[in-house]
Image (spheres, rainbow, N blue to C red):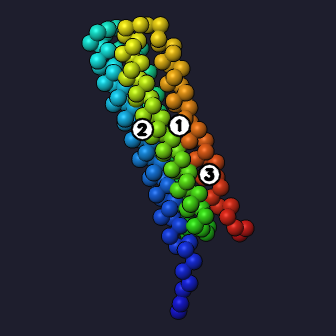
Amino acid sequence: MSTVFSGDEIAPFFGFIGAAAALVFSCMGAAYGTAKSGVGVASMGVMRPELVMKSIVPVVMAGVLGIYGLIIAVIISTGINPKSKPYYVFDGYAHLSSGLSCGLAGLSAGMAIGIVGDAGVRANAQQPKLFVGMILILIFAEALALYGLIVGIILSSRAGQSRAD
């Protein structure tokens, strides 16, 4: 009894790594953005405690990044079921690239949100006219993670299309 190694036996490994990468990197971005923005909010709250609730926006926006990674991780993990239908190396690589695109975009967006949030809430405490500008910059930083989520969904949908079954 000889079995031929086709490479497809390791395909689920790449799929699961993609799911883990999406969640881990997105949560790292969310954690960094929350921590960095939170430091700015705490520092600003000493000077102007009445602005603390208004300045919590960057912390909330950073927290959303983890949800993006969770969405992709769930999409990927539900697509990995080699017992019900064949799961090829192409599918594993599609899921890996899906997870990495969403996760790394979430990480970079979290870093941007953290830096902008920290400086923005401190500046807003000194000059309230800067609030709208800070929010716009945060929206553009959040959009980077949204681009990663969209690309991740598209790449994940490519899995299962490698061969005609």
Q: Which residue was labeled with disc 2?
A: 29
Lower position in the chain sequence, tag 2 or tag 1: 2
Q: Which residue was labeled with disc 3?
A: 155
Residue 75 seen in render: no
Which percent across, then down, holds residue 77? Answer: 51, 55
Q: Is residue 150 above or below residue 142?
A: below
* Label 3 environment density (alpha carbons within 10 Å; few <14, some 14–19, many ≥20): some
Kindly indicate the quadrant of the structure image that contains residue 150: top right
Q: Is residue 151 above or below residue 88?
A: above
Residue 111 seen in render: yes
What amino acid is found at the position of numbered circle 3 in the picture? Leu
Q: Are marks 2 and 3 in contact (CB under 8 Å)?
A: no
* Rendered residue at 56%/41% (across/down): 148
Q: Are marks 1 and 3 in contact (CB under 8 Å)?
A: no
Left or right, residue 3 beside residue 116: right
Q: Marks 1/3: CA distance?
A: 15 Å
Q: Which residue was labeled with disc 1?
A: 145
* Rendered residue at 58%/47% (across/down): 152
Lower position in the chain sequence, tag 1 or tag 3: 1
What amino acid is found at the position of numbered circle 1 in the picture? Ala
Left or right, residue 150 beside residue 163: left
Looking at the rendered structure, the secondary structure element under dot 2 is helix
Q: Marks 2/1: CA distance?
A: 10 Å
